[in-house]
Image (spheres, rainbow, N blue to C red):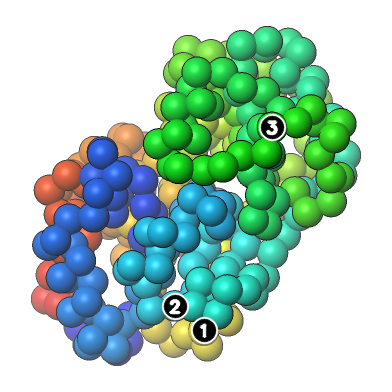
Amino acid sequence: MDFNNVIFVSDLDGTLLTDDKRLLECDLKAIERFKNGGGIFAAATGRGYAMAKRVVELITNAPSVIFNGAAVYDFGKNRFLWRSEIDGRAYEYVDKIGQVFPNIGAEVLCEQTVYVPYLNETEKTHLEWEQVNADYRKTSEIPKSGWLKFLFTGEPELIDKVESYVQNGDFGGVNWVRSGPLFFECLPKGVDKWSGFQRLIKLMNAENRFTVAAGDYKNDAAMIENADLGCAPNNAIDCVKDKADLVVCDNNSGSISEIVEYIERL
């Protein structure tokens, strides 16, 4: 297939990035070959601006979907092209869950600020690993506008309990998604990576291009299922691999380069 007819959106953590958050040389070379051939390559990540910036700038030739679909950001021009805020009624969910689960960690992500109202060891490690300078303050002290998403962090067993508590409680008006074993997120209603991908397609005037999506976890499932070619690395969870048209090697072995080679053969 001619790359000039393709728009390829990839998840970062667990898909493009290795387990220790590196970009493999084989993937970088494949992405450059894809872009040089006229392909549009973008990221679709749960990361916000601060966490995505240092990776996205190295690999893309287009704006990217960030905040798990709540925004499309042009890192080349340093501006939001589109964004969606969480309904104001959801603000109370942070403290309601924090009171029931006192060992939980939490982040509130706005345009370029990460607020942390609840800190635990998982959250501390997450912020250190991603090199984020967070703003630590109580939920009541966080500005009540501009929330693009918030998330809870903890060991898998704790996040399992939080997810169950939310599913069986009155926490509507938003979209809840498990984005990893350690993360449970709240997004604006109707928002996910696929809706963000669709928004990107319109912004790029790429409606006639063949769509490719790659990801490894539940928050990637919708875009993998709906893209013309949905791809998953071998380390993806089973329910995501079941939705994929193509399963390739794991994220530590050059999954993106294998997808690019597959597109070339179409």
Amino acid residing under circle 1: Met
Q: Are marks 1 and 2 in contact (CB under 8 Å)?
A: yes
Which residue, given by chain and number where applicable, does mark 1 sit on?
A: 204
Task: Write the residue at 47% across / 60% down.
Answer: 53
* Mark 1–mark 3 distance (CA, rounded to whole Å): 37 Å
Q: Which image quadrant for residue 214?
A: bottom left
The numbered mark at residue 136 is 3
Circle 1 Cα neighbour tier, 10 Å, few/some/many (<14 / 14–19 / ≥20): few
Question: Which type of secondary structure does the marked residue at label 1 adopt?
Answer: loop
Circle 3 Cα neighbour tier, 10 Å, few/some/many (<14 / 14–19 / ≥20): some
Single out the mark in the foreground, 2 or 3: 3
Quadrant the C terminus occupies: bottom left
Asked if residue 144 is positioned above or below residue 58 in the image, the reply reads: above
Report the number of discs.
3
Question: Which type of secondary structure does the marked residue at label 2 adopt?
Answer: loop
* Mark 2–mark 3 distance (CA, rounded to whole Å): 32 Å
Q: Which image quadrant for residue 125?
A: top left
Task: Write the residue at 45% across / 34% down.
Answer: 128
Sequence-first disc among 2 and 3? 2
Sequence-first disc among 1 and 3? 3
* Mark 1–mark 2 distance (CA, rounded to whole Å): 8 Å
Amino acid residing under circle 3: Tyr
Single out the mark in the foreground, 1 or 2: 2
User: Does any portion of residue 176 appear in the rendered image?
Assistant: no
Which residue, given by chain and number where applicable, does mark 2 sit on?
A: 62
Q: Position of residue 59 (x, y in %)?
A: 32, 68
